[in-house]
Image (spheres, rainbow, N blue to C red):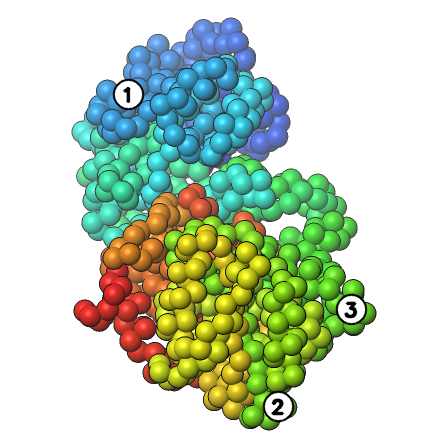
Amino acid sequence: MTTVCIVDPLGSGKPYIQECKNKGLSIIQLYTVRKKLLQELNPKEKNYPTLYLKQDRSNLNEIIETLKSHNISGIIPAWETSIEIADIIAEKLNLVGNSTKTSLNRRDKYEMRKAFKAAELLPKHFKFAQCRSFSELETFLQEQSFPVVIKTPRGAGNNMVFVCHTLSEAKSALNTILMKKNIFKEKTNYAVIETFISGIEYFVNLISDKNGVYPTDIWAYTKTLNSKGKVLYNNILQITDKKIVDRLSKFAVKCVKAVDINYGAAHCEMMWDHDTDSILPIEIAGRLAGCKVPEFICENSNVNIYQQLIDIYLTGTIKEKFSIEFTNRLAVAMCHNYRDGIVDHITGLERIQGLSSYRSHGLHGIAVNQYLPETQDMLTVPLIVRLANNDATALLNDLRQTHQNFKIFFQEESISSNENKINSSPANGINLKDVAIGSAILGSGGGGPVKLGFDIANTITSTIKEAGLDNVKVINIDELNDDDLIVCYAAMGSEDMGDTETVVPENPKFIDFIKKDLVSNIVGIMPLETGAVNSLLPFKIASSMQLPIVDVDMCGRAVPTLDLTGISLCSESDQKFQFYCLTRDDDYISIYTTPKKAERFFRSICADTGIISTFMYPASVGLIKKVCNRNSLTISAKIGHWARENIKSASDIGSLLDYIKEFSPYHEAEIIAQGEIIENKKINKNGFMYSKILLADTFNSNIIELRAMNEFYELLINNKKLAAFPDIISVFNNLTHMPITSDECKINHSITVVKISAPKLYIENSDKSHAVMKQLLGRDTTAQLSI
């Protein structure tokens, strides 16, 4: 009987045992991993002769002699740790295998990069080095800007891979790699430091024999972050687009040849750099992919990868001409845990198993009444779900549903829920911090960050208490007479001010002016626009003035900064108002003019002084009733409360959109993209500043472009618009699960982009502002702004 030796039949290498048995082969197992790791993995196949390599390899020759005595015909490297030993044994026993001279190229990430460089697969700007000390780290950073990547040289599964944005982060990463053991319980005396590459990350699986190299399947990663900012793989999605497949396959074949994988499996990871439209290798190994991907391929194609590889390790070639066809498109969901704690219970598995795409799942390290650490890498993912469907749309939907359905509940849940509890005095039962969250979601990336909204809410609470009041009264506009006056209140900056952390506080001089000149004529205060800051600023004045807040706004969202669009939407272009603007030098300005002229005047002040100004103008209730968005604060509070109570991970955002559609005027809402920000830069065109934000959307293997002028106003793929003003385009940080502004979109952050269609009333109002929208969208050749 033909005998084979399987080295480290663990992970995706386990099925080699059954497949060898199916071929009628006799099996010897050889384990090279540390005993402690083997105990943790606890391989169940113990019915075959088993050998164990000592840590110092002192019994290697003895093992080779034993295998020789059994007259083995093939040696199979089944796992990452098996590569070097399999090469040595194959060479000693004259079996099919790869050269021992290049073994390290397939195992050590530093040697791998040297091989890639020699094969001219790395661009000139890509730098890498071994790093053993802080001084070597600082030397590398003298010629390399942040971010940089620091990784352990012989890891796997994204273990000990750190994206570092500061010197402090880099030193911490280096210290971790040098002081702690990697995923295989091995220590190292150096780390690999290298240039950070932005783009979409892919992997290609291949097999090689003496006749050639054959790509089998191509996948893309999506990523997220844990609570400590560690990058995690969130999903892997099979890529079927022929142009992408062909280009990645050709590059992967070059990588295989660069590291001398002449026989057996290869797993090649690479990054598609959007800026240069070039593909760069990340790493490659002479093994199968993880997450049971090879088994998944066998179940959904005409090829048994394991049988093909066994033939190669026995004879040097596959028996038939290689050709693979798939019956379904495939995806794998990695459902993470975002905190440490004792598990109380989990939910959602039954719903996941009921999805049309569901095929199988694996729970790892999770048990009731047991401690579960936060996910750090591929080996600490609590749930992995494999999905397959010949309908790509259904597959993507089920992928999102998988994440939305899986929930982990911990004992003493108050530990985490206390962090989310918001103690802010209500306004007629409306929680002000709920308003901040909800209005930020509807703010389309403008109107101020949630954190600043929280700060304002705390200030309002203090002001209410100092005044001896229970709350700020919120009233319905239909309770008011048409001849009454309401003050619209907002903040304003200049287009090129950049990040802003503060807003102008209540100024006593300004408040005195309001009291003397306006209070007798007005019945309430209202926000001009929606946003975490926009919606709450009026509460500051109202709490000081003991005036009610009118539950409306003029826009239903923050709006792109041009010609005070919020007012333009609500009035004829030549209609004049009395505007009052407070500047930070304790002065205020009053002018009677049109909205267009008022904004240009105020923004010029902001640009000259480098500050944000607060401004207001009184308008009649009759006019506002015609054009306002009713109950905007109540709607924002409901949305914010639901988000605060129910969003535990980025996968819950889809459920939030369903909730928004149920009760609000926003009856259409959908997730457009999820992925990693690879660029955010300011563009100055024709005197106007706007942000260009690029997102690597790995679901669809596309680069998404977001354009923002304070607020998001366009979302494009290949210059084709997916959403545009007046629709709401909102972005969620996948780590905090909170909405963020355009200025908060940082490179390497994982985000979810959603589109919320504008309500009917808002579209009707926009008829009065066609010129503004044409300017914003660049459709008017006579406009000042054309982007």
For the residues carrying marks 2 and 3, which lies nearer the camera in this image?
Answer: 3
Which residue: 18% across, 69% down?
Answer: 781
Circle 3 sits on which residue? 467
Q: CA distance from mark 2 to mark 1?
A: 76 Å
Q: Position of residue 199 (x, y in %)?
A: 33, 43
Which residue: 70% across, 44% down?
Answer: 341
Circle 2 sits on which residue? 480
Q: Position of residue 74 (x, y in %)?
A: 35, 22
Q: Is residue 375 above or below residue 586?
A: above
Q: Position of residue 634 (x, y in %)?
A: 61, 76
Q: Are marks 3 and 1 in contact (CB under 8 Å)?
A: no
Q: What kind of residue is marked 2?
A: Leu
Circle 1 sits on which residue? 115
Q: What kind of residue is marked 1?
A: Ala
Q: Quadrant of the N terminus?
A: top left
| Mark toward the start of the polypeptide (2 vs 3) | 3
Quick one: 52 or 747, which is closer to the camera? 747
Q: CA distance from mark 3 to mark 1?
A: 72 Å
Quick one: 22 or 399, which is closer to the camera? 399
In the image, is 228 to the left or to the right of 137?
A: right
For the residues carrying marks 3 and 1, which lies nearer the camera in this image?
Answer: 3
Which residue: 52% across, 60% down?
Answer: 583
Q: Is residue 397 visible?
A: no
In the image, is 79 to the left or to the right of 416?
A: left
Q: Is residue 377 visible?
A: yes
